[in-house]
Image (cartoon, coloured by chain):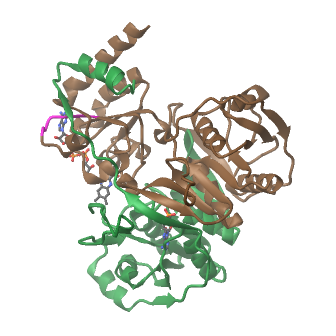
Amino acid sequence: MKILVCISKVPDTTSKINFVDNNTKFDENGVQYIVNPYDEWYALVRALELVEASGGTVTTITVGTSSDDPTIRKALAIGANDAVRIDGEPTDSFFVAKQIFEYAKNENFDIVMTGKETINYNGAQIGGMLAELLDMPFVSLANKLDVSGTQATLERDVQGGIEVVEVDFPFVLSASKGMAEQRIPNMRGIMAARTKPLNVVAPTDHNKLTSVVKFELPAPKTGCKYLDPESMDELVELLHNETKVI
Amino acid sequence: MSVLVFVEIKNKLSKAAKEVITYGKNLGEVNVVTYGNANNEVLLEMGDYGAKNILVYRKINEPNDQVISKLILKAVDKLDAEFILLSQDQTGKSIGPRVAAKLEAGHISGAISFPEVSDNFTVKTNVYSGKAIAYVCVHSDKKVISILPNSIQPVENKVDASISEFEEDLGNGRIKTVDLKPLGDGIPLPEAELVVSAGRGLKGPENWGIVEDLAKSLGATTACSRPVADIGWRPHHEHVGQTGVAIRPNLYIAAGISGAIQHLAGVNGSKVIVVINTDPEAPFFKAADYGVVGDAFEVLPKLTSAINNFKASQR
Ligand SMILES: Cc1cc2nc3c(=O)[nH]c(=O)nc-3n(C[C@H](O)[C@H](O)[C@H](O)COP(=O)(O)OP(=O)(O)OC[C@H]3O[C@@H](n4cnc5c(N)ncnc54)[C@H](O)[C@@H]3O)c2cc1C
Ligand SMILES: Nc1ncnc2c1ncn2[C@@H]1O[C@H](COP(=O)(O)O)[C@@H](O)[C@H]1O
């Protein structure tokens, strides 16, 4: 079984979000980067479990600059066999998907995995775009994956329930919570990661179809109005008359 | 300039469908493409929100991602659509990117505003899990926009709608649905207007009755903090926050939740936040509109009976 896992780097979940240069750029000052949790905890770990059980390889792929290398090494430390980095700025989803497609189209992967979304861009776009470019089915928001031979059974969230689906290799999925448990890399993994291959590939030329022109922080709350636990009738009255939400 | 809206219709017109049609009406004359066997009366109701031409594809056996994407792409071709609009729900998340990639069109997922067109075409979306907002500019002629549920107020705007049946060969897609486990018929969290949520302060799953009672009185959907889902007190799909479901209801009531930054990230788009916590120093109060310093075991039942009294007085 040959699995490709798409990995991106995101600011640590405790990061304070600020912008510089007239609110056009993310302020990286003091920010720690981690592997996007959906890519690491769910996609990568499940991919590793599958090849540990029935053989195969797990390759990670990242569209990014050399500043992504530490998070890529983390994925190798957790257990991926090798990594590919396409040396480009990931500012547009179509550009990213196209780069991954150019690499993946000749590699005959059985399963291509992405996370449900990145926790910085929150696009939830790359998986579906990749599936279309590769002409494969896309199982989005999967929270369970089992494989038998060349057939996979998955569960995923849909409107109003959980759907169980079957699909033959090859296919693309986006992983959401439940697919696997987080793994902490051990010392041996971290040592091994240093010598595992991280292949840097030049990007191919593609249009960027979108760009962010500026950022904005949400308006801060004006302050909390405190109510006595005995005055719940008053709270209901405020919710009805003052803020009109009920 | 042609606008194509994709909606899914079961037996009634969903709020999400009304939101997307309203969005489309803001851009031009609205064409709708849908599938399935909803009756014409339900389809024509879309005219109340501005849908003019309704294309319906009646014969879909297995409405999977490949087939629905094909359906939309055929409709885009037929109408030479410039704007393709859908809801950023589970279906939208699997279809929108496919359609955009095929058309090489810029894709805005999770739009929370109408486009700004004075300078160039920009739309606001939530980024950094709701900790910030981005103004995204689309450079391509065709644009695929999915609208975040509960972000656009549906507006009635009656036009005379007409229905035409749409027949094309859509092929079969390879995903086969073998089972569907329903999660009750409550409103799913991303679309909910009212949400009641609880955290580790509730001490154990056996205490969730008071949370459910309040939700029931309000007609709200229930949610929880991450540790509560991780230890199995509540199902995973209730977990809200940065690594769970992101929500933006009109009202979010949080009991026994401390308000960690990762929790706030997924809920601070809520219009009004009520926090109930025994600890006056709990960080959540900083993000709250209304705060009650008190024991959830006492406050929740009191709030429930206050809601019940209020509802009774409204009748
Ligand atoms: C990478 C990462 C991602 C994360 N993602 C998420 C996420 O998406 N969503 C999320 O929720 N968390 C997330 N977390 C976890 C987060 O940091 C917090 O640990 C978590 O939100 C705390 O849950 P809690 O408030 O229920 O529990 P606690 O922090 O234990 O808080 C319990 C609260 O209940 C109060 N309390 C106790 N008894 C009562 C009572 N009788 N009545 C009223 N109040 C009472 C206490 O004062 C306290 O404030 C993430 C963490 C990490 C590291
Ligand atoms: N720059 C990138 N390089 C590789 N994979 C990425 C990149 N950005 C996003 N992805 C993958 O695509 C998923 C969805 O990302 P997004 O569409 O940005 O929300 C992520 O969870 C990753 O698996």
Residue found farthest to the bottom? A195
Q: Residue at x 34, y 27 (%)?
A: A243
Q: Position of residue B14 (x, y in %)?
A: 61, 33
Q: Position of residue B261 (x, y in %)?
A: 27, 53
Residue A97 to residue B135: above or below: below
**Magenta highlight range:** B274-280
Q: Is B207 or B147 nearer to us in this picture?
A: B147
Chain the render paints brown: B
Q: For the image shown, how many numbered marks are present on the structure?
A: 0
Q: Is residue B307 magenta?
A: no
Decide if residue A11 is on the left or right side of residue B78: left
Q: Residue at x 12, y 38 (%)?
A: B280
Residue B264 to residue B306: above or below: below
Q: Could you tell me if residue B38 is visible in this image? A: yes
Q: Quadrant of residue A137?
A: bottom right
Q: Is residue B276 magenta?
A: yes
Q: Residue at x 62, y 29 (%)?
A: B156
Residue A55 to residue A119: above or below: below
* The C terminus of chain B sits in image quarter: top left
Residue found farthest to the front? B118
Q: Position of residue A6 (x, y in %)?
A: 50, 72
Decide if residue A3 is on the left or right side of residue B8: left
Q: Position of residue A129 (x, y in %)?
A: 62, 65
Chain the render paints green: A
Residue A133 to residue B198: above or below: below
Q: Residue at x 30, y 87 (%)?
A: A191
Q: Quadrant of residue A80?
A: bottom left
Q: Is B16 or B68 nearer to us in this picture?
A: B16
Q: Could you tell me if residue A152 is visible in this image? A: no
